[in-house]
Amino acid sequence: MGSVFGSLFCVSTFGESHGKAVGAVVEGCPPGMRLTESDIQKQLDRRRPGQNDLSTPRSETDTVTIYSGVERGLTLGTPIALMVPNRDQRPTDYGDMTTIPRPSHADYTYQMKYGIRATSGGGRASARETIGRVAAGAIAEKFLRERYGVEIVAWVSGVGEISAPQIDLNSVSRTEVDATAVRCPHEEAAAKMAELISAVRDDHDSIGGVVTCVCRNVPAGWGEPVFDKLEALLAQAMLSLPATKGFEFGSGFAGSAMRGSEHNDLFVKKGDGLGTRTNHSGGIQGGISNGEPIVLKIAFKPPATIGKDQKTVTIDGDPVVLQAKGRHDPCVVSRAVPVVEAMAAMVLADAALCREAICATRYPSGR
Amino acid sequence: MGSVFGSLFCVSTFGESHGKAVGAVVEGCPPGMRLTESDIQKQLDRRRPGQNDLSTPRSETDTVTIYSGVERGLTLGTPIALMVPNRDQRPTDYGDMTTIPRPSHADYTYQMKYGIRATSGGGRASARETIGRVAAGAIAEKFLRERYGVEIVAWVSGVGEISAPQIDLNSVSRTEVDATAVRCPHEEAAAKMAELISAVRDDHDSIGGVVTCVCRNVPAGWGEPVFDKLEALLAQAMLSLPATKGFEFGSGFAGSAMRGSEHNDLFVKKGDGLGTRTNHSGGIQGGISNGEPIVLKIAFKPPATIGKDQKTVTIDGDPVVLQAKGRHDPCVVSRAVPVVEAMAAMVLADAALCREAICATRYPSGR
Amino acid sequence: MGSVFGSLFCVSTFGESHGKAVGAVVEGCPPGMRLTESDIQKQLDRRRPGQNDLSTPRSETDTVTIYSGVERGLTLGTPIALMVPNRDQRPTDYGDMTTIPRPSHADYTYQMKYGIRATSGGGRASARETIGRVAAGAIAEKFLRERYGVEIVAWVSGVGEISAPQIDLNSVSRTEVDATAVRCPHEEAAAKMAELISAVRDDHDSIGGVVTCVCRNVPAGWGEPVFDKLEALLAQAMLSLPATKGFEFGSGFAGSAMRGSEHNDLFVKKGDGLGTRTNHSGGIQGGISNGEPIVLKIAFKPPATIGKDQKTVTIDGDPVVLQAKGRHDPCVVSRAVPVVEAMAAMVLADAALCREAICATRYPSGR
Amino acid sequence: MGSVFGSLFCVSTFGESHGKAVGAVVEGCPPGMRLTESDIQKQLDRRRPGQNDLSTPRSETDTVTIYSGVERGLTLGTPIALMVPNRDQRPTDYGDMTTIPRPSHADYTYQMKYGIRATSGGGRASARETIGRVAAGAIAEKFLRERYGVEIVAWVSGVGEISAPQIDLNSVSRTEVDATAVRCPHEEAAAKMAELISAVRDDHDSIGGVVTCVCRNVPAGWGEPVFDKLEALLAQAMLSLPATKGFEFGSGFAGSAMRGSEHNDLFVKKGDGLGTRTNHSGGIQGGISNGEPIVLKIAFKPPATIGKDQKTVTIDGDPVVLQAKGRHDPCVVSRAVPVVEAMAAMVLADAALCREAICATRYPSGR
């Protein structure tokens, strides 16, 4: 269990970091949509390792192939199988792993759960698993953009203690985000972040960061009440990413210090519907979108693999000094940007389909 | 969709705030467990309105009845239906609601989704819906406590700008929590919080807050990888609660400012397994519990219903001044404590059952 | 697990035969639909015991109450909780049950699965569980009828060796079906069936039978491919009913003896779409409805409770002679008629919602 | 929706008949199990076309590759991705298909549902989709056999009007089944069947048939009550196969003509538990296995593709004479044998995991 996400737009991923391939099966993509590998490759390229000297040197082109669900460039409404081969597998990099669980990795917990684990790399817990998500998310995003004009843009808003100043949520674009290697649209902050990441890397250490994401043009009425509130599924989606530690939407934790008279988003007329004067609600009220931008913030911890010695114990409890040798990023947030966008897209595409089912069948009664 | 939670320990809730009743159906509770209404009533009483002058005066005893799934005081392994009648319904309190969507409530979004909504109170978006969750959670908790010794304790760690100092996660108990009306186990902080809530109430306003929750004695190996990581389901569970804005586990957002060498939880021998020296991981690594305490933090916004005039618009966009008249809490966190505990219990009970299925069937090979 | 059915139109039932109540929660009913208890009661009355001397004398009015999801006579799109109290509980009727598992009942298997079972009656395996299904099905049916003009009619087509001659599938109505106590629209066959049931009852025995069901005006395009084919879900739905042993649709087992040239349903123009000359397909091709009537046939075994002595063994394997004392029907098919209709309605309502989600989102490309 | 099956042992398939590949993802296989491609290939070879002159000449080796979930020959507990490339694609064979929906195929209904369909072959409705099922089923079966000694054997019990005499359910083996090309373990009947199939083929026609399946050594206590009864999921599984028209277990339709005193399976002591004297229940009582052999019968219609002219209409309703040109079997039942076994294995593996979850967590109270 655990590798399936979504109800109507349903994605399942497969693949270990050092197995033959990673991939995804996407079920529920609306039929008749134009789709080619290049629609997907674009986001995979943004996630790919080795894009610049801030990320891991693992050498992978991450080229995706569509194996089903598409004919003559059009989706058939049937499951779309996507696969990316693992080329640069180096099982020997992880020699000690069988006896020494790496601190703050998933080695120990997988062993306790399954009684066995991939002997190389993080297996399913590896960031390589997110390839399937990015591929699936690119499909979700294409549908959302074409049908509803939904725009999803994520960026790095913090690295270590460095925070980017407030970005204009209504205009920030992927072009602006990709203008810097760090993927922070505020140039000055980006420079400081890059500097910090380089320093941390040279220190054989790693550093955490924060990704912010805005989803624009989401129509009012998406999301389910109670357990599947839109924010709840977005929280699940984001916290399901490796290395995440926290999630906020709208006012977030800061909202807990506010008064109702200050926090309430008063309604105003906007176009032929209603909008709100402020957006502390982060675009969602009672689990359902209200038409305002959906704004999310996700905290990522520093990568657990570092180049420093670590005093830990073997699986039998014997003291040992561990020197990690795998290839990893000093900071994950820049490459996490397309992954966060993918997860947001998957949640929203599912919500869109659920909404359409209700809109098409609800009775015209009531207001 | 949206009213069902969990895969093996599966809870669905029903009921509107001003309908005949609210309740839940719990499927998957292990058979043969002793269970009576009093096991459940205890937590419902902690959630109940009107416990003291810090909460809404709505008068409800919230008495639960078990309608199925239990015979002669033992669970049968079949669905347990639980119901609490709504006694103090006051539909007339909400006269304007049909034309004026209340700011930062779910009125507008429900209308946009369903084309109709409960004419009184929050319907499904009301905090009364959480009664079913608390009832179901009490059952989950009983199983977790009896079978694994799991202890779940939540408390108010923040109200407005007031934060409680660090509480001892290994010892904090419900007795300590319930010692103050605010439910903050730090007496001094609790007094300040109570004062603030009273002041806010007298000002016809409301205030947000933070609930922290610790789950102790969770065995290593619970949780699923990828999309259903333990932290992902906990995030979904908590963000599915009304009025929540953020979620953290372990180091949370603070962890994003840390370095790997500082954040990594080095392993040490503990009992006949491994433990960690620090617990920045918050008891979960790679989506699976590692045996250390699971620590969560949830941000709640200030209640949207306030006694002040609000300049908003009608559903047609016409300017109007809204004076709210419903009965509501100036601050929800104290009553949210048992609800947070219930959600944590539901997630963990489900993880426990999933784990047992694997443990009972995995091959003895591997380590 | 096991008490939930459907994905978008989702029904869960609860309740043991001799507990406080039985009922259902229906999630996914389109919002804004007129619904009162009387819409549901009608079908419950057709299922109710004691309607005539062919059925069990257990005295129950089976009066349903709606507890949520409906306000001022309109559905809200939220879960509809339905409950029917058990009035005529007679736990003492089943004194021996704790030590002697009744032959061909579920006593032994429930004990083996759960390690415990309801000490009276069939618990969840009782036919009383179907009350929740009938109530939920009545809601599904109302939606199908109002929105699409779908008509579902089931009847008794066989009792023991007696089979009704071919009924006109295009015209058969519930009025015709209810014209006889047996619920066979062929008067002559009905008389013979009634005679046989009376004879069997007087002989303290029981007898099996067959129910046929037709669903008219189902639009083309309902149903999912592969595992959730419309016929597959209908088969699951019907085989989930107590006492069923077989399922056919269209040509059924007889079709296995036919040649393709004879079995193929050639297309003809019908209205503004296509129809078929014959209907060996039973209204479904490749798992998806084709617009022709959907025709099902379900085999029911003779009730396991009989008034004759049975030489069996106790749970410990000791030989014993069992004399059953519970109240049961000599033949279940007449009362099964509304239950079969309910299951068909639940499957079709779910298929309708899934279809609408696709229709509302598919691209206009392709034909 | 529709391409996923099972809750704990969960299989999803993908792939169109003339796309790049077909395959499956299996989630929930117990970790630590030895597994290689050859464990799977064996059953694929039994399903493969072109095995002899009774089946379609489409030339495919159907060689499976495992892409994930297995390392060093052991399952990891993570999703197992399986793929078989389509080699002998001949899109041009189906030139007329875009305008003429083939009678009793899924062309018309897919078009009505999706507004688009695979232009060649049956797409998802093709029998090639069952490759993923057979591959997944082989994994399920290996687990069932190794852990519980479960034996699943299916065979052809009928072709056209020819029925095999009663086979010994306790001893029939795959070796006996595979002794004839028809896969009927009764030599004499097999010869007649082969003769009939050849005659039908020479007549450019097709013929239906019946497959019987026995599952031995299934422990008592597998299966869920109510909607997910073991027989209900088996019925869904079998009716989800292309070309099926009916399903029976135990006494089946014949049981509907029997009396209770004759049909009831009296208990007897067997080993250290109970067994039954007869097995009209077909190994399942109240939806849960009772330890006796589970016996199923599935009706298959004659393949819709025939070499004869068919007077039908185009998608626009214009009369046309269709001459089919695709490559197809005159009778599908022989190749359906491993597919039926696969579906039975998938249902039982899922039931096994669900059972273990309950057994590991139920309280020792009760009997």
Image (cartoon, coloured by chain):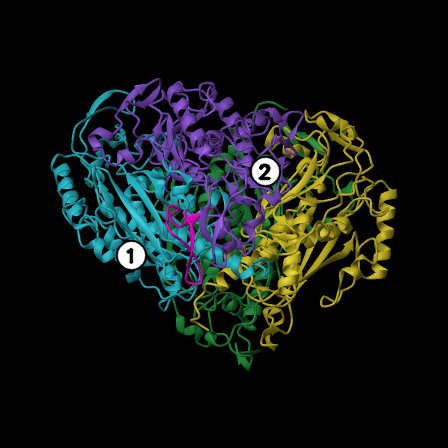
Chain colours: A purple, B cyan, C green, D yellow
Residue C257 visible in rendering:
no
**Labels 2, 1: one chain:** no
**The label number, if any, that marks residue A25 in the structure image:** 2
Q: In this view, does B239 lie to the left or right of B305?
A: right
Q: What number is the disc on residue B64?
A: 1
Mark 2 residue element: strand
Amino acid type at image mark 1: Val
- Can you give x and y, in whole percent of width and height, for residue A180 in the image? 46, 21
Q: Return the residue nearer the eye: D108 or A151.
A: A151
Residue A263 appearing in the image: yes
Relative placement, left or right, of D37 versus A168 is right
* Near-viewer residue (C82 or C158): C82
Q: Quadrant of the N terminus of chain D?
A: top right
Q: Does the segment drawn in magenta span residue B85?
A: no
Q: Return the x and y of residue B358 as percentages of the image width and height.
A: 53, 57
Residue range corresponding to the magenta coloring: B265-288
Q: Does residue D138 sit above or below A336 in this rendering?
A: below
Q: Label 2 marks which chain's residue? A: A
Quick check: D224 above or below B123?
below
Q: Nearer the viewer, residue C300 or A37?
A: A37
